[in-house]
Image (cartoon, grey):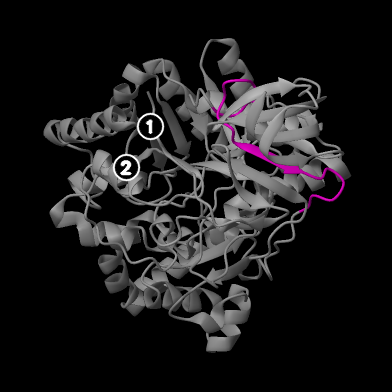
Amino acid sequence: MNFDVIIRNAIVVDGTNSPWFKADVGISNGRIDFVGKVPLDATGKEEVDAEGKVLCPGFIDGHTHADFVLLQDPLMLSKLKQGVTTQIIGQCGISPAPVTDDKVEMLDQYVGFFKGGTTLDWTWRSFGGWLDKLETLSLGTNIGACVGQGTVRLAVMGFENRQPTQDEMEKMRAYVEEAIDSGAFGLTSGLIYPPGVYSSHEELCALTTALKKKNALYLSHMRSESGAVVESVMETIDIGHKNDIPVQISHHKAAGKMYWGLVQTTLQKVDEARANGVDVTLDLYPYDYSSTTLRAILPAWIQEGGLQKLNERLADPSVRKQVMGEIKTDVSWDNYYLLGGGSEGITLLYTPKTPECEGKTLSEVGKLMGKSPIEAAFDIIVANGGSDTVCYNAMSEDDVQYVMKHPAAMFVSDSIFGASGGKSHPRTFGTNPRVLCKYVREEKVLTIEQAVWKMTGFPAARYGLQTKGIIREGMDADIVIFDPETVRDKATIENPQQDPEGIEYVFVNGVKTVEKGVCTGKTAGRVLRKK
């Protein structure tokens, strides 16, 4: 027996939630060629002794925002070093396509806080053209993509706060159909962000009918993850029920101390829906603090028309006064100023035009600027042109653990990437090792088999990645080998760009991309298209 790679003596956690077993694994031509006891006289061009180490499928990060930074950092070291071999981009309603000639500048501004300093050439227009662009990159990980409902709406209607005409609805459906036909894995929405926030339930139901042809997913950053989270879960379930399509609740949580515990009610609704035949699942990241743009403290009305209009309004002292009053008291939207616990609970991570603010709370920034924290926030939003990232201390650790134990929940990172050297949420570097360290080894919330399944076999099945996510003969050789006794995340809010420990080997499509914790520089990622 001859192989390209032989991995001997591994503790195999195969991604199916079955009990671990001891085995050798042979790799040939990018595929898993053998699982069992490899004869001693078998030869491999390379051999790895995995005695005492866990071998499992490469981690599948089913919700990342790497869309734009891929163009300047296709290797994605922060992902490879934590064992991620596949990413699904285009989340929260935001994707780089479709885009029209007259909306390029508007979309470029809109996606500012996801770009991480990347300059885009915008040479594509259709979703298929965007996937073709990705095909030209030397990718470190496999990449699958969803199409964003917010991007689709922007291409047709800009940032107009109204319902679409019949002609506009047909144009949006045509964009979604083109994306699905080109290989998109689903349609995502971000219903707290303009322009998605202006979409009615009826509009979403009409648009998602385009997914049924390929049984593609609808994934939603819902209208509310706070006071109206139960109603928002029911809205997502209703879309799945009416169109008979699979739906997924993105990064599920109950944000804001006053709403902690509501996940018990929302997961009961999920159980009831599944019992009635609605294919609904959810994902989460293993942290009790979230991250998005500082604009999440603003009401939707002030953001109508896009960033230029927002900046014009914030230049008016009377408008600032009105908005400040709403931010301090109004919970009719997901007001992350209040949900995050006020100015002390908001930490600025990436503010490229005001770097002196990075790493400080909004309260500290206000003192630095000599003004109230909310006034300082307005100035930062304007100065950075929407290209900022912050953390909100809005979640409960008890809720996080309650959600992760649910059988319909999988792990994701929801990574937003800062520029090279810039700060980001620790999940960008630490998600998967954190699960294995904190929630498996230390706190024993999950077994190792459960945790690995929620990061491999489950997301593979959910997205229809038929050759990923399981250690089985004939599957793609996306493999991670880690030390179960030492694996741990090291990234923190103060120092988020720290590589984890204990991830020893990573193979992407049979190519060794990490060896003894160090990237080899080899790239073997592929663009994945839904069949």
- Quadrant of residue 483 within the rendered picture: top right
Residue 465 locus on image (x, y percent): 50, 27
Q: What residue is shown with label 1?
A: 529
Q: Is residue 245 above or below residue 61?
A: above
Q: Give percent across and percent down for residue 531.
A: 37, 23
User: Callout 2: few (<14), some (14-19), or many (20+) C-alpha neighbours within 10 Å?
Assistant: many
The image shows residue 334 at horizontal and vertical percentages of 51, 50
Q: Secondary structure at mark 2?
A: helix
Q: Which is more N-terminal, label 2 or label 1?
A: 2
Q: Amino acid at mark 1?
A: Arg
Q: Is residue 137 magenta?
A: no
Q: Main secondary structure of the magenta part?
A: loop
Outermost residue to the top: 276
Identify which residue, 407 or 302, lies in the foreground. 407
* For the residues bearing labels 1 and 2, Cβ distance under 8 angstroms: yes
For residue 139, side relative to residue 148 (left or right) = right
Residue at the (84%, 51%) spot, across then down: 486
Residue 264 seen in the figure:
no
- Quick check: can you spot residue 129? yes
Front-lying residue, 330 or 222: 222
**Is 442 on the left-hand or right-hand side of 377?**
right
Identity of the amino acid at label 2?
Leu
Count of numbered labels shown in the rendering: 2
User: Can you identify the residue that label 2 sits on?
Assistant: 131
**Is residue 341 placed above or below 460 in the rendered structure?**
below
Crowding at label 1, few (<14), some or many (≥20) Cα neighbours within 10 Å?
some
- Residue at 46% across, 21% down: 246
Magenta span includes 469: yes
Residues in magenta, as a range? 468-488
The tag on residue 95 is none
At horizontal 59% and vertical 57% (from top left) the residue drawn is: 78
What distance separates the C-alpha of mark 1 from that of mark 2?
Answer: 9 Å
